[in-house]
């Protein structure tokens, strides 16, 4: 029975070399002549080591697991299209993309070896694969604005039909669409979806089609056993496997060369930055980042999106430069936007973005400094909002310090745009480092976000 070993969104796993080693050890332990090793995007970036190596650390991983197939996630363009092409050319897996195009409408990185679809014969079955990427990538990654991300469902339908014509017994979608996977199943003739983009795990069947997603940061590998008449899924926790010592050594050599171990300050209690903490509402690390932004710029409000805070081990008690880079490992500037009170209220109104394609419906997306938001969960809206202790005046003007990404994105806080830009400062993590050196890097949960619910009160 053919088996697919599926990982996705491993992102900053490389900053924990032992965990990266266990991920590779898990894949290698499961691999055999009847298996293919498959990734579904965001496996080259972001992360501290990724930032230093510009995605090159993933080459060590691909070699260690003998990767077969990969597709593009939005973060695989973090260092620009030219660097992505270099990584495609240098990496072991075949990159499969059906809806990413470069100049002149030509398939992206075709000269470097990408293919629109491919088949693999495994253990008596012919498996067909195509890859699709979130079409919003150009709006959520400033480094991808010059690329074209066509309709993934039309591309998928065409690829699936071509694979059937090519003799595929089963068609497998390598998807970085996140919540779009259900629509992919509804509109395309596929037998299996290996998903990514959303960082929550998934093991589901929709209209008879299995959809699996491993979550983020290399904690889980899915083993998908494929037969002509059935598909079985087995979840493997990578922490239970012995690390690949060769990969650990290769990554540690890159870490040592990075020189980011300077201790900037010390805090009494480490700060949790797990995704379930950061996406649940106000938290210490979100407050500290927003405080640093406001301090570095003198803005009225600091604003950090939850998705921009990368998960990992707790921060502290020693806070190093590497720690702060790992929180926001992007080469993006801290910027200041000037908005009206009405626009600021609209931005706060997007603090729980249930319609975003890369998060869960109940995720909280805003961390603030200099402001207070009262949110009604039952009505799903802001009912009160304050800046510097005063109710927001719709006619007044306010300055907001945030990442350049949020001015560029149309998916998060769309009320704040490039048209509102009035200032640009250092790279985000450099601002955090300066704040840590001069002020410290700590914060308390102090009621900046208040979530009310009559339902909870009745309980």
Image (tube, grey):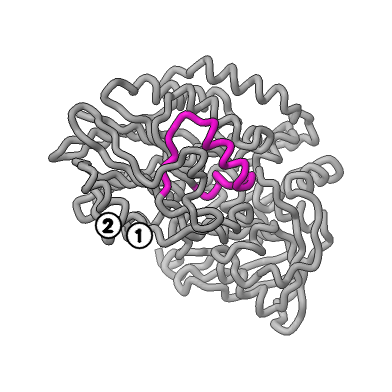
Q: Position of residue 138 (x, y in %)?
A: 56, 58
Q: Quadrant of the image for the C terminus?
A: bottom left
Regarding residue 202, the answer to whether it shows in the image is no
Residue placed at 28% from the left, 56% from the top? 185
Residue placed at 27% from the left, 50% from the top? 162
- Secondary structure beneath disc 1? helix
Residues 174 and 287: in front is 174
Q: Which residues are magenta?
A: 73-97
Q: Position of residue 80 (x, y in %)?
A: 63, 47
Q: Residues within 10 Å of mark 2 (few under 14, many from 20)?
A: some
What's the mark number on residue 153?
Answer: 1
Residues 159 and 320: in front is 159
- Where is mark 2, residue-wise? 188
85 is within the stretch colored magenta: yes
Residue sitting farthest toward the right: 438
Residues 113 and 209: in front is 113
Residue placed at 82% from the left, 58% from the top? 297
């Amino acid at each position: 029975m053919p088996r697919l070993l599926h990982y996705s969104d491993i992102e900053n796993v490389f900053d924990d070399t032992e965990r990266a080693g266990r991920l590779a050890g898990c894949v290698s332990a499961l691999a055999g002549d009847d298996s293919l090793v498959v990734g579904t995007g965001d496996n080259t970036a972001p992360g501290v080591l990724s930032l230093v190596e510009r995605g090159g650390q993933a080459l060590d991983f691909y070699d260690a697991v003998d990767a077969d197939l990969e597709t593009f996630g939005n973060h695989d363009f973090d260092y620009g299209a030219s660097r992505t092409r270099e990584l495609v050319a240098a990496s072991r897996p075949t990159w499969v993309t059906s809806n990413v195009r470069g100049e002149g409408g030509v398939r992206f990185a075709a000269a470097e070896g990408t293919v629109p679809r491919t088949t693999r014969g495994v253990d008596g079955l012919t498996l067909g694969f195509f890859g699709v990427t979130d079409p919003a990538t150009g709006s959520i990654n400033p480094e991808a604005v010059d690329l074209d991300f066509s309709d993934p469902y039309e591309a998928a339908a065409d690829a699936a039909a071509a694979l059937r014509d090519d003799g595929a017994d089963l068609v497998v979608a390598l998807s970085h669409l996140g919540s779009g996977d259900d629509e992919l199943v509804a509109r395309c003739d596929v037998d299996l979806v290996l998903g990514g983009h959303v960082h929550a795990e998934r093991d589901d069947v929709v209209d008879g089609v299995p959809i699996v997603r491993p979550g983020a940061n290399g904690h889980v590998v899915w083993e998908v056993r494929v037969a002509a008449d059935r598909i079985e899924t087995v979840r493997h926790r990578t922490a239970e496997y012995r690390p690949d010592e060769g990969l650990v050594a290769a990554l540690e050599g890159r870490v040592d060369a990075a020189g980011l171990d300077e201790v900037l300050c010390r805090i009494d209690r480490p700060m949790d930055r797990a995704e379930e903490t950061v996406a649940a509402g106000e938290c210490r690390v979100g407050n500290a980042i927003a405080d640093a932004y406001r301090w570095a710029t003198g803005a009225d409000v600091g604003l950090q999106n939850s998705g921009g805070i990368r998960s990992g081990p707790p921060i502290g008690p020693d806070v190093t430069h590497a720690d702060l880079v790992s929180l926001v490992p992007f080469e993006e500037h801290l910027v200041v936007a000037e908005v009206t009170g009405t626009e600021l209220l609209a931005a706060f109104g997007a603090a729980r973005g249930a319609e975003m394609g890369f998060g869960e419906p109940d995720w909280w997306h805003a961390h603030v400094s200099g402001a207070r938001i009262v949110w009604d969960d039952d009505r799903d809206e802001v009912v009160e909002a304050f800046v510097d202790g005063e109710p927001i005046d719709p006619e007044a003007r306010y300055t907001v310090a945030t990442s350049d990404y949020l001015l560029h994105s149309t998916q998060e806080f769309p009320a704040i745009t490039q048209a509102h830009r009035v200032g640009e400062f250092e790279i985000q993590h450099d601002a955090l480092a300066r704040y840590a050196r001069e002020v410290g890097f700590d914060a308390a949960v102090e009621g900046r976000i208040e979530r009310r619910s009559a339902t909870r009160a009745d309980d």
